[in-house]
Image (cartoon, rainbow, N blue to C red):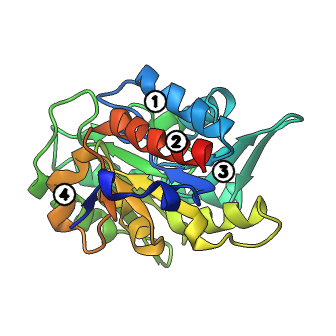
């Protein structure tokens, strides 16, 4: 089981140079961005920690995050692309051909649309029109969340869909089911992003950390030796084979701010 955040030593926290993080219910909480979280991101930037959002969120939301939040960059739609704003320009990198991406997305949308005819109480995410690659089904955003059993059932049925010769990937976040065609994932694109902005090399894993709250963060918990769950991950811990190393006392963005405070303190005093 995860250790309490209080067991993270300042000496160990001082080594963290890249902090990769989920967004919904990890940086945000209950659909809002707490001011404590925004301040925490600014403080991390000041002490030289490069924060990268790694999210299932749509391209439209990622565009806003990359432009306005104090982040190094944003990986969106579970690894379909990344966005980064620097002093000279705004950069967007697709991991697969954009024309092929849109063709596969349309085919997948139509297949899931047919599937959802059997679940009249469930609809696509309201931000579907702003997605480059994936298809998102609303399971808990601005609605009464559906049961865990029903989420699992729908996810299994979506994973059985084939688009061309490829089976569909599907993950569950705290609010959506995200489905896509392609080999990309949070981890795969996370590695590519880090190499892109670290002179072509993957940083030493001891300098990397990840923060998440949900089932779709398990790939990152498996990959990195230092990971964190915000407190609201507790209900799904038993469903994770790979669990976060530490867990915060507080939920969502408030828990993220708690972790950021430890890292900032470590960077400032050591």
Looking at the image, is mark 2 or mark 4 earlier in the sequence?
A: 4
Under tag 2, what secondary structure?
helix
At mark 3, the secondary structure is: strand
Residue 118 versus residue 230: which sits nearer the camera? Answer: 230
Which of labels 2 and 1 is toward the front? 2
In front of the other: 122 or 239? 239
Between 34 and 267, the one lying in front of the other is: 267
Asked whether residue 125 appears in the rendered view, the answer is: no
Alpha-carbon span between mark 4 and mark 1: 23 Å
Direction bottom: furthest residue: 165
User: Helix, strand, or loop for circle 1?
Assistant: helix
> Is there a contact, CB below 8 Å, between mark 2 and mark 4?
no
Judged left or right of residue 6, residue 122 is: left
Q: CA distance from mark 3 to mark 2?
A: 29 Å
Observer able to see residue 130: yes
Q: Nearer the viewer, mark 4 or mark 3?
A: 4
Tell me the mark number nearer the camera, choosing from 3 and 2: 2
**Element on which disc 4 rests:** helix
First reached walking from the N terminus: tag 4 or tag 3: 3
Q: Which quadrant of the figure has residue 63? A: top right
The Cα atoms of the two marked residues, 2 and 4, are separated by: 30 Å
- Judging by the rendered image, the residue that carries numbered circle 2 is 265
Q: Nearer the viewer, mark 4 or mark 1?
A: 1
Q: In the rendering, which numbered label is found on residue 171?
A: none
- Residue 223 in picture, x, y percent from top left: 47, 73
Mark sitting on residue 236: 4
- Name the residue rendered at 53%, 48% in the picture: 266
User: Mark 3–mark 1 contact, CB under 8 Å?
Assistant: no
Q: Position of residue 66 (x, y in %)?
A: 65, 36
**First in sequence: mark 4 or mark 1?**
1
């Amino acid at each position: 089981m995860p250790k309490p955040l209080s067991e993270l030593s300042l000496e160990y926290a001082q080594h963290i140079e890249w902090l990769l993080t989920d967004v919904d219910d990890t940086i945000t909480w209950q659909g809002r961005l707490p001011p404590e979280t925004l301040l925490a991101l600014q403080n991390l930037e000041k002490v030289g920690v490069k924060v990268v959002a790694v999210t299932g969120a749509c391209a439209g939301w990622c565009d806003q995050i990359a432009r306005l939040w104090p982040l190094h960059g944003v990986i969106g739609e579970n690894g379909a692309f990344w966005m980064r704003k620097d002093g000279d320009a705004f950069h967007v990198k697709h991991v697969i051909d954009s024309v092929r991406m849109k063709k596969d997305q349309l085919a997948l949308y139509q297949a899931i649309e047919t599937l959802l005819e059997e679940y009249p109480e469930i609809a696509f995410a309201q931000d579907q029109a702003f997605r480059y690659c994936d298809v998102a089904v609303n399971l808990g955003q601005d609605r009464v969340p559906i049961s865990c059993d029903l989420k699992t059932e729908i996810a299994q049925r979506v994973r059985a869909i084939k688009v061309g010769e490829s089976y569909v990937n599907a993950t569950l976040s705290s609010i959506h089911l995200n489905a896509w065609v392609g080999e990309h994932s949070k981890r795969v694109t996370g590695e590519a992003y880090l190499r892109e902005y670290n002179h072509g090399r993957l940083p030493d894993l001891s300098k990397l950390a990840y923060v998440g709250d949900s089932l779709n963060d398990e790939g990152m918990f498996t990959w990195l030796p230092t990971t964190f769950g915000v407190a609201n991950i507790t209900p799904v811990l038993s469903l994770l084979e790979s669990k976060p190393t530490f867990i915060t006392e507080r939920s969502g963005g408030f828990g993220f701010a708690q972790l950021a405070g430890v890292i900032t303190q470590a960077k400032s005093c050591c």
